[in-house]
Amino acid sequence: MAAPTITFPARRLVDKGFRYRSAAETDVKATFARERRRLAAERAAKDAQQQQTLDLATDNVRPLPARATK
């Protein structure tokens, strides 16, 4: 089993951009929806780039021989 990793917050408490939000103000459902959209957009961009790479690599495609008719 791998050793647990220590993670630190992205912003420190003394950072000017940090704004405290109480649990009542936090909308977890919206946060997860936003992250799902972000991950889906990243995945779509990666898939589009991979598809473009596959479209360019047509030199390794060979036609199948035709079957003999009876």
Image (tube, helix red, strand yellow):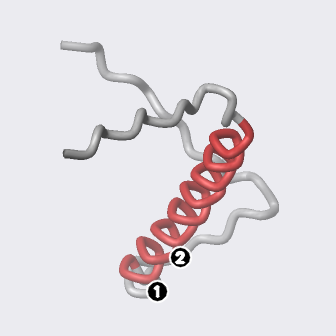
Q: Residue at x 58, y 60 (%)?
A: 44
Instruction: Verify CB contact (< 8 Å) between mark 1 and mark 2.
Output: yes
Placement of 7 over or under 69, stated as above or below:
above
For disc 2, the neighbor class at 10 Å (few under 14, some 14 to 19, many from 20) is: few
Left or right position of 17 against 8: right
Farthest front residue?
Answer: 70
Q: Residue at x 77, y 54 (%)?
A: 15
- Disc 2: which residue: 21
Q: Position of residue 54 (x, y in %)?
A: 63, 40
Q: Amino acid at mark 2?
A: Arg
Q: Amino acid at mark 1?
A: Glu
- Disc 1: which residue: 25
Q: Quadrant of residue 53?
A: top right
Q: Position of residue 35 (x, y in %)?
A: 50, 66
Q: Position of residue 18 (x, y in %)?
A: 70, 63
Which element carries disc 2, helix, strand or loop?
loop
Which element carries disc 1, helix, strand or loop?
loop
For disc 1, the neighbor class at 10 Å (few under 14, some 14 to 19, many from 20) is: few
Q: Nearer the viewer, residue 26 or 60?
A: 60
Q: Nearer the viewer, residue 23 or 60?
A: 60
Q: Nearer the viewer, residue 14 or 9?
A: 9
